[in-house]
Image (cartoon, coloured by chain):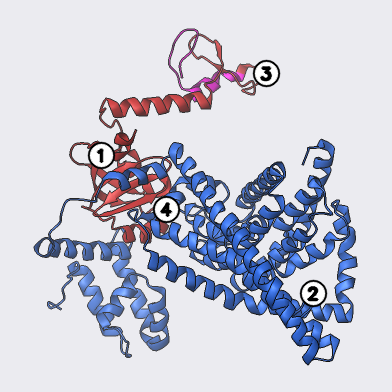
């Protein structure tokens, strides 16, 4: 094997040859590569070999064990170190290095982002900028223009009048148009309310992602996340959760241990409001700063409390934090736009069918009367947390889409007082993940954990709502 | 700790032995000095933490040599100190970090410079910067190499 670029220790080379001779079947890789991967303990290759060279497997396992016993360090590490040596030997003849990494402003800003003293104000500034962009430009200006301007004035009246002329049966007509129709409710919510908010969020998120800020933020809050059973790496799904919890639940795959994935899934479902929900809650509580503050503090407190408890209750080993810090860079507009578009396309494809499904379910529910039955079943619980009966529909809708509920609440602004609005906003934030998120929870975490999480979240949300309404009415704050 | 009565230095653990004659058997929250028998109020954790911070800062300013016996890990290096990797700890559950260390290029002979120690450890190896927590930092065995360089963080302040 003298033609090989990388020469390992003679002892390892002998093991490679011996294992290579045991392999009889055909592999897409050379026998040497397969042998190396077997030595390094690659699970996938082991499974392939088990499949194709079943009889040779015991002998191969023996050879691997023999090679392992000769080394004090894991074989995968030894092999990688020897490859690295070859690289170091080759590089000086080929590569010329110019200085080191550029210092200057970028390096100083990078350090400031990681230093807790300067990093926390930078984080707060970034959050305020995010709020202005998503909460004000997206949720208020764009939504107002699309919702009232396009749909309210043109699309909805046009659909209704068209249906009135074409379809003589009122049952089918209410399926497509009217108050809860597929076209007038499902499509309108998806395109006019959710798309602008989610789109602006994804745009802002792509800028943050491309600038290289996230790894530095991960380092900054690693200690805090360790206390709630996660590590700094979890900052990516958590921040993404403020855009769409469904997408963020899928992204929890990138977390290393099962324990972290479970805790992150529960926290996303419980205490991270998605951008659509955030937008509507900001709109409802905008003229009540104290109520907004109480809402934020309660949700943050629940996030920390539940995370802290979960870190003690969920078994498994604690994960280590390690991350590359790429240099800070100015994002490229074309890249940001492509990313935003890709995410929005995914979102629409994932979510639009569910909006339509929700409209259809409400339609079936109304025809068969189950909708009203569910409303009257939920009614006592809603009144128990101090809300009037009108809010029941909003809470029930909250299950179909997180923001359906909040949007329903938006219509009730005039009816509810400050305490009731705060309680409703908190309950809806904590309350069940939307159908899409629940489906993803089942798919990603399995039915046991998903059911367990939902069985915990629903009563918990109402208990917190009840406690909050009692405390707030005792305190008599001017909300 | 130091006795506030007679100024004798002693370990808080050894002081506990003198509790056997007392009916409270160590549940009083005080530490009795073994040499003069005075009941000291134990040092507050907050105060020791602040003192340690101050010591670290002074140690950096005075360019104090590292005073540590036994194998040196990444976590023991002062800021701006160039070092060479001599090995990696694989024992006692640290083996689960092996793949990460391979990915970061932490092999014997690799040169690195430590750039931050708080809120986590940041070091430069080759042209890449990595951030790790103290668990991972303690598994990287190093050997000091060359003079410490001033670092961006200190220019920043």
Q: Tell me which chain the residue with mark 1 is part of.
A: B
Check disc 4: other Cα within 10 Å, few if <14, some if 14-19, many if 20+.
many
Task: Give the residue pinned by disc 1.
Answer: B81
Real-space Cα distance between discs 4 and 2? 44 Å
Task: Give the residue pinned by disc 4.
Answer: A213
**Nearer to me, B106 or A150:** A150
Discs 2/3, front:
2
Real-space Cα distance between discs 3 and 4? 58 Å
- Note whether A3 is above or below A258 in the view shown: below
Q: Tell me which chain the residue with mark 2 is part of.
A: A
Image quadrant occupied by the N terminus of chain A: bottom left
Real-space Cα distance between discs 4 and 1? 26 Å
Who's the residue at 41% across and 28% down the image?
A: B53
What span is colored magenta in the figure?
B1-20
Image quadrant occupied by the C terminus of chain A: top right
Residue A244 in sight: no
Task: Give the residue pinned by disc 2.
Answer: A179
């Amino acid at each position: 094997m003298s033609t090989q670029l990388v020469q390992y220790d003679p002892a390892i080379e002998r093991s490679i040859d011996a294992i290579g001779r045991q392999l009889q079947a055909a592999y897409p890789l050379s026998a040497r590569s397969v042998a190396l991967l077997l030595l390094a303990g690659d699970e996938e290759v082991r499974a392939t070999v088990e499949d194709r060279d079943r009889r040779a497997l015991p002998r191969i396992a023996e050879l691997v064990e023999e090679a392992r016993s000769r080394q004090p360090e894991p074989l995968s590490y030894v092999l990688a170190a020897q490859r690295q040596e070859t690289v170091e030997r080759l590089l000086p003849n080929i590569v010329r290095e110019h200085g080191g990494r550029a210092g200057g402003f970028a390096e100083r800003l990078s350090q400031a982002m990681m230093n807790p003293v300067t990093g926390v104000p930078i984080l707060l500034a970034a959050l305020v900028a995010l709020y202005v962009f998503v909460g004000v430009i997206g949720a208020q200006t764009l939504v107002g223009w699309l919702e009232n301007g396009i749909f309210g004035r043109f699309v909805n009246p046009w659909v209704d009048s068209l249906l009135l002329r074409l379809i003589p049966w009122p049952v089918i007509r209410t399926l497509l148009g009217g108050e809860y129709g597929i076209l007038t409710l499902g499509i309108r919510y998806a395109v006019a309310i959710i798309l602008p908010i989610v789109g602006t969020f994804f745009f802002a998120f792509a800028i943050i992602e491309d600038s290289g800020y996230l790894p530095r933020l991960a380092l900054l809050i690693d200690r805090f996340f360790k206390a709630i059973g996660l590590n700094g790496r979890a900052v990516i799904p958590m921040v993404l959760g403020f855009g769409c919890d469904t997408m963020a639940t899928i992204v929890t795959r990138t977390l290393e241990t099962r324990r972290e994935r479970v805790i992150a899934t529960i926290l996303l479902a419980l205490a991270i409001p998605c951008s659509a929900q955030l937008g509507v809650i900001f709109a409802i509580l905008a003229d009540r700063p104290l109520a907004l503050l109480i809402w934020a503090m309660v949700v943050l407190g629940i996030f920390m409390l539940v995370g802290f408890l979960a870190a003690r209750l969920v078994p498994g080993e604690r994960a280590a934090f390690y991350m590359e810090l790429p240099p800070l860079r100015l994002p490229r507009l074309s890249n940001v736009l492509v990313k935003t578009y890709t995410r929005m396309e995914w979102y629409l494809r994932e979510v639009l069918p569910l909006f339509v499904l929700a409209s259809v379910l409400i339609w079936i529910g109304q025809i068969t009367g189950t909708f009203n039955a569910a409303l009257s079943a939920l009614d006592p619980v809603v009144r128990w947390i101090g809300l009037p009966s009108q809010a029941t529909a909003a809470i029930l809708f909250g299950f179909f889409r997180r923001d359906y509920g909040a949007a329903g609440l938006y219509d009730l602004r005039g009816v509810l007082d400050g305490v009731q609005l705060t309680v409703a906003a908190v309950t809806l934030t904590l309350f069940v993940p939307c159908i899409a998120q629940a489906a993803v929870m089942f798919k990603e975490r399995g039915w046991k954990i998903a059911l367990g999480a939902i069985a915990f979240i629903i009563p918990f949300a109402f208990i917190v709502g009840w406690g909050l309404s009692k405390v707030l009415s005792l305190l008599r704050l001017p909300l | 700790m130091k006795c506030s009565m007679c100024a004798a230095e002693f370990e808080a653990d050894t002081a506990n032995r003198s509790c056997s004659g007392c009916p409270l058997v160590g549940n009083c929250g005080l530490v009795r000095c073994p040499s003069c028998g005075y009941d000291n109020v134990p040092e507050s954790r907050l105060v020791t933490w602040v003192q340690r911070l101050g010591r670290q800062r002074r140690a950096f300013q005075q360019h104090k040599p590292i005073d540590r016996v036994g194998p040196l890990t990444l976590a023991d290096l002062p800021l701006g100190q160039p070092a060479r990797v001599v090995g990696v700890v694989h024992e006692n559950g640290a083996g689960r970090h092996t793949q990460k260390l391979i990915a970061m290029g932490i092999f014997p002979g690799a040169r690195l410079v430590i750039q931050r120690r708080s809120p986590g450890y940041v070091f430069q190896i080759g042209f890449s910067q990595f951030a790790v927590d103290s668990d991972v930092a303690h598994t990287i065995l190093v050997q000091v190499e060359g003079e410490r360089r001033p670092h961006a963080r200190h220019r920043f302040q």
